[in-house]
Image (cartoon, grey):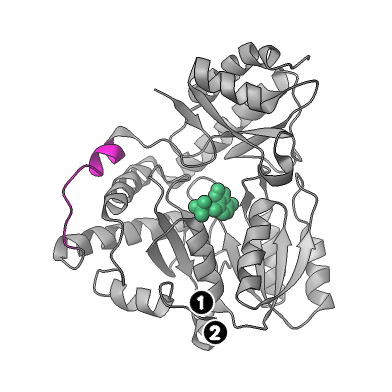
């Protein structure tokens, strides 16, 4: 079987795969309501929030769009803190719906600085919301969201967080860090298939929502809330993905959030140390530990496309490449969800064999 070590979709445990093979049920019936209630309770526990949490049938990007259109109006000034591909995407969505973007970009591979966020907020008092990516999957950098959120709180702005590849794997206490909307996706650390976005909505986000005028229909949080009260979603949900998420959340709650977070930290260290032991250098600033994805630079003759091809064909290991301007310049090892130290040790052993075959001269 292939070792899928990209930063999502991630492998699903057998129990989760089995859960998807059962017959469909009535999404307006009692059984579905019980399942959705349990999913919501488990998500609240893992998001560390008492706020509302909704499950949307969509990929993560749909969840980002939901965050934007439910909280903002055309013409709102938005500070976009961006450290890579996904930070740019979040801003692009807001811009498409008419927000005025004030970009705060950091070099790819580095983390955002809370002081720079403070300066930007000081410079433009009319900023309404701050967009930030917790874990930038394209570079493997985890922003210091605790510090950034403290600054956003100082200025009493809305904080919209792309936590797609962090929630459920990296510690993110949504309430303590004042995240007004936090978004994640089922195919990342949640050990479930793609197809669901999960979003939390704080009381402050609800206040913004009441005045927000961006167009929305499918994503409307008011509809999501009123249907959830009946144990339903407004639209037909991806029922097999819901069964899968129900099962994976039960497994996650059993393992316990602190154990999950500790496991990801250990696995991240195995990946990081392993990459360095091979003579490769990490693409990203090592001060910002990469718990769910590590990016290695292509140096010393390494042909990334060839490396990934040989790994896949001869070792059944699938790694991620670089996105956009990082194409050919880095490769990425995803280690989130169902992953152990042994899985990553296996990847490192295979890399040791394949790197010279792909031109790397250490
Ligand atoms: C940080 C981050 N944001 C956004 C996305 C987009 O999610 P999706 O592909 O599920 O729409 C991803 C997926 O890789 C991600 O890792």
Mark 2 Cβ inside 8 Å of ligand 1: no
Looking at the picture, how far across and down is residue 308, in whole percent?
60, 25
Label 2, on which residue? 212
**318 is higher (above) or lower (below) than 60:** above
Looking at the picture, how far across and down is residue 267, in whole percent?
55, 31
Badge 2 element: loop
Numbered tag placed on residue 254 in the rendering: none
Q: CA distance from mark 2 to mark 1?
A: 6 Å
Point out the stretch of residues depicted in magenta.
15-26
Q: Look at 74% across and 17% down and name the residue there.
A: 360
**301 is higher (above) or lower (below) than 103:** above
**108 is higher (above) or lower (below) than 312:** below
Are the two marked residues, 2 and 1, in contact with CB atoms closer than 8 angstroms? yes
Badge 1 element: helix
Q: Say which quadrant the C terminus sits in.
A: top right
**55 is higher (above) or lower (below) than 312:** below
Instruction: Depth check: give the residue in front, 319 or 45.
Output: 319
Numbered tag placed on residue 70 in the rendering: 1
């Amino acid at each position: 079987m292939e070792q899928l070590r990209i930063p999502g979709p991630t492998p699903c445990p057998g129990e989760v795969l089995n859960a998807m093979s059962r017959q469909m049920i009535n999404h307006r019936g009692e059984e579905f309501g019980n399942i959705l209630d349990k999913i919501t309770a488990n998500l609240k526990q893992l998001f560390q929030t008492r706020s509302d949490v909704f499950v949307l049938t969509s990929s993560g990007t749909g969840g980002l769009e939901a965050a934007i259109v439910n909280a903002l109006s055309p013409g709102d000034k938005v500070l976009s803190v961006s450290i890579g591909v996904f930070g740019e995407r979040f801003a692009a969505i807001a811009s498409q719906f008419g927000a005025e973007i004030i970009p705060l970009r950091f070099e790819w591979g580095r983390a955002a600085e809370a002081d720079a966020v403070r300066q930007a907020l000081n410079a433009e008092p009319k900023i309404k919301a701050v967009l930030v990516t917790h874990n930038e999957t394209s570079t493997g950098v985890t922003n210091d969201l605790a510090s950034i959120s403290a600054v956003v709180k100082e200025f009493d702005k809305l904080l919209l967080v792309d936590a797609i590849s962090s929630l459920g794997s990296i510690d993110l206490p949504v309430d303590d860090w004042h995240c007004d909307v936090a978004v994640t996706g089922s195919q990342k650390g949640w050990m479930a298939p793609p197809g669901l976005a999960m979003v939390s909505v704080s009381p402050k986000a609800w206040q913004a929502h009441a005045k927000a005028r961006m167009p929305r229909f499918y994503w409307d949080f008011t509809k999501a809330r009123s249907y959830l009260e009946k144990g339903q979603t407004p639209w037909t949900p991806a029922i097999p993905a819901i069964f899968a998420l129900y099962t994976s959340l039960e497994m996650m709650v059993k393992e316990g959030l602190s154990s999950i977070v500790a496991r990801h930290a250990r696995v991240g260290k195995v990946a990081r140390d392993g990459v360095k032991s091979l003579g490769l250098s990490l693409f990203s600033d090592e001060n910002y530990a990469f718990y769910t994805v590590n990016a290695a630079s292509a140096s010393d003759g390494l042909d990334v496309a060839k490396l990934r091809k040989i790994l896949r064909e001869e070792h059944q290991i699938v790694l991620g490449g670089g996105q956009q301007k990082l194409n050919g310049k880095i490769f990425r090892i995803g280690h989130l969800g169902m992953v152990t130290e042994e899985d990553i040790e296996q990847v490192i052993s295979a890399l040791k064999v394949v790197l010279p075959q792909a031109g790397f001269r250490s």
